[in-house]
Image (spheres, helix red, strand yellow):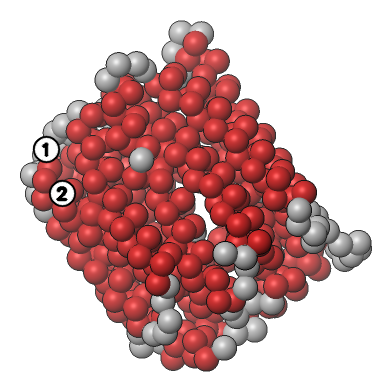
Amino acid sequence: MSRNFKKFMLLWSGELISSIGGGLTSFGLGVYIFNKTGSAAGMALVTLLGFLPTLVLGVPAGVLADRYDRRLLMMLGDGCSALGIIYILICMLSGGASLAQICTGVLVSSVFSALLEPSYKATITDLLTKEEFSKASGLVSVAGSARYLFSPVIAGLLLGVADVKLLLIIDICTFFLTVAGAAIVRKGTPSNATEDNESFIRSLKDGWKILTEKHGVLMLVIVSSFITLFMGMFQILAEPFILSFSDATTLGIAETVCASGMLVSAIYLGMRGIKSGYALKMAIALSAAGLFMIGFGATLNIVVIAVFGFLFFASLPVANNCLDYLVRTNIPNDAQGRAWGLIGLISQLGYVVAYALSGVAADAIGEGTALGVGRGAAIVIIASGICLALIAISIAFIRSIRSLESV
């Protein structure tokens, strides 16, 4: 194992811990809001406010990642994002947090978290060789899946003996560990900071130019925005769907079983990687994910739901690995921060639409059919799965995307 890969592993370990802590907060607040309001729309609103600032600010954060020390930006983003969680905790200790107070805290945390993602992705490129990207991508998927794999079962069990405040306290503690890890990596890694006096707008334009120089990269990012739309519907509505006929402990166990599919797949990719056929394998993986979404929403049997959820999550690291490789190897290293900021903005616009509409749609369908919010959520999940499968198939037929593999 190279010295830089060891640094990556330290950085990755910090993000793994941070992901688990964030997952505890996300799960706990979701259950808290659903039990308090009985609405999927309330859960979706909190998710939207937690996601939107990170998306919008990710673009200027990407410019900063190319201009200033990326490791320092990661430390600031991780450390200051704890402020929002602390605010929610204080409100709860004072007698209970309202939906508005929770939204405010999540919003503050998300604003600072925007500094993290472009710098983290660009730092991976700084540390690793091209041959190590695929294995690193698999490990990054494991860290990303930790909030779904480990956090739900831990949170579900803790909520059986305590309340959401304990989950918030644990999450706050994880920030200290992740900041420390980034500080150690920063100490032994040359800074990428430059003395470039280029204006922010000019830097942004240059990033857009680099992103659009290869038509395949732009097409891949645009297709990804449609994919995130339908996957976002599933992400938001899976919890209210299960909570409509079960409890928090069962939900936590089911989510962990489902997310373990991502762990199995990501570990395999971390050891073996993907050598070729990235566009085709991404299309197959995402098409399968759509079919598994349909199966997930078609039953109230928790065992069957867990099986389809497991298969759904198992397909995601393959798709993410392929997309990450195709984009990363087609963008110059000195523009990685700006590029990932723009890529994040465009590709994740689908999440914004999903978070804004999914809860409202589930509530409306549930009320209109008199079947309740749970079945309304299931109907939206099934429809989203069909659309995801159809969109994913198109990837295999887009020549400009397939041409990215020739680099």
Mark 1 or mark 2: whose residue is earlier in sequence: 2
With 53 as the anchor, is 221 left or right in this view?
left
Q: Amino acid at mark 2?
A: Ile
**Left or right for 199, reference 235:** right
Q: Nearer the viewer, mark 1 or mark 2?
A: 2
> Quick check: 249 above or below 257?
above
Q: In the rendered view, would you say 127 is above or below 58?
A: below
Is 73 drawn above or below residue 400 in the view shown?
above
Most distant residue in the top direction: 95
Asked if residue 341 can be seen in this view, the reply is no
| Residue occupied by mark 2 | 305
- Label 2: which secondary element: helix
Query: Quick one: 233 or 13, which is closer to the camera?
Result: 13
| Secondary structure of the residue carrying numbered label 1 | loop
In the rendered image, residue 9, in percent from the top left (x then y), is placed at 56, 54
The residue carrying mark 1 is 370
Which residue type does callout 1 highlight? Ala
Q: Quadrant of the C terminus?
A: bottom right
Q: CA distance from mark 1 to mark 2?
A: 23 Å
The quarter of the picture where residue 167 lies is top left
**Relative side of 27 to 2, left or right:** left
Does the rendering let one see residue 229? yes
The image quarter containing residue 331 is bottom right
Residue in the foreground of this view, choosing between 92 and 36: 92
- Looking at the rendering, which quadrant does residue 43 occupy? top left
